[in-house]
Image (cartoon, rainbow, N blue to C red):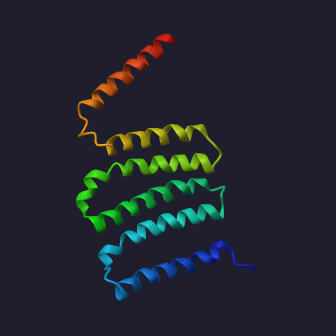
């Protein structure tokens, strides 16, 4: 009888945990540098669970949020936590990417595109350095507002 994905998962998790706990013994890495591995690994586990049963596309949301967050934490651990002041908008982008993945790998529900697009746009807007262009973004908001008014009046 062939093993199922469900019976393989605990073994894979234990092997990964063993490697993570073994690394500080053979490298210069320490636990304070490896803790984001747990966040990242949990995201990867959610991706594997989705791949095992593609009907459960809702798993893509936590998978994406945890993976993006884990990668951000790794980046901050090695580059310095001061960098979080620049990359925090990725916390907004992550669920937006999750919605898009749920759309593309799920039932193509149009309702997933709207929140996904909005979250990604807002996150990228802030990631683009809103403070560097503080004179520009109010003009963009005014232009979009005028366009919406003209569009509403035309209808």
Q: Quadrant of the N terminus?
A: bottom right
Q: Is residue 26 left or right of residue 115?
A: left
Q: Residue at x 25, y 62 (%)?
A: 81
Q: Residue at x 61, y 41 (%)?
A: 109
**Up-down relation of residue 42 to residue 10 (above or below):** above
**Up-down relation of residue 36 to residue 72 (above or below):** below
* Residue 25 image offset from top left, x and y in percent: 35, 88
- Count of marks, rendered view: 0
* Residue 82 image offset from top left, x and y in percent: 22, 59
**Up-down relation of residue 113 to residue 83 (above or below):** above
**Up-down relation of residue 39 to residue 10 (above or below):** above
Q: Quadrant of residue 22?
A: bottom left
Q: Residue at x 48, y 49 (%)?
A: 97
Q: Is residue 114 left or right of residue 78?
A: right
Q: Quadrant of residue 40?
A: bottom left
| In the image, farthest residue toward the top | 154
Q: Quadrant of residue 125?
A: top left
| In the image, farthest residue toward the right | 1
Q: Nearer the viewer, residue 135 or 97?
A: 135
Q: Is residue 18 left or right of residue 85?
A: right
Q: Nearer the viewer, residue 108 or 138?
A: 138
Q: Residue at x 47, y 67 (%)?
A: 42
* Residue 122 image offset from top left, x and y in percent: 38, 40
* Residue 153 image offset from top left, x and y in percent: 46, 11
């Amino acid at each position: 009888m062939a093993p199922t994905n469900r019976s393989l998962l605990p073994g894979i998790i234990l092997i990964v945990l063993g490697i993570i706990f073994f690394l500080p013994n053979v490298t210069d890495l320490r636990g304070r540098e490896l803790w984001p591995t747990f966040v990242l690994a949990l995201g990867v586990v959610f991706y594997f669970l989705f791949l095992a049963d593609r009907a459960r596309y809702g798993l893509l949301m936590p998978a994406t949020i945890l993976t993006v967050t884990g990668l951000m934490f790794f980046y901050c651990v090695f580059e310095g936590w001061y960098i979080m002041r620049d990359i925090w908008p990725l916390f907004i982008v992550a669920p937006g990417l999750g919605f898009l993945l749920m759309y593309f790998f799920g039932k193509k529900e149009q309702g997933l595109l709207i929140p996904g697009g909005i979250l990604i746009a807002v996150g990228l807007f802030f990631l683009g350095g809103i403070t560097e262009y503080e004179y520009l973004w109010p003009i963009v908001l005014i232009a979009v507002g005028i366009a919406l008014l003209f569009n509403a009046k035309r209808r």
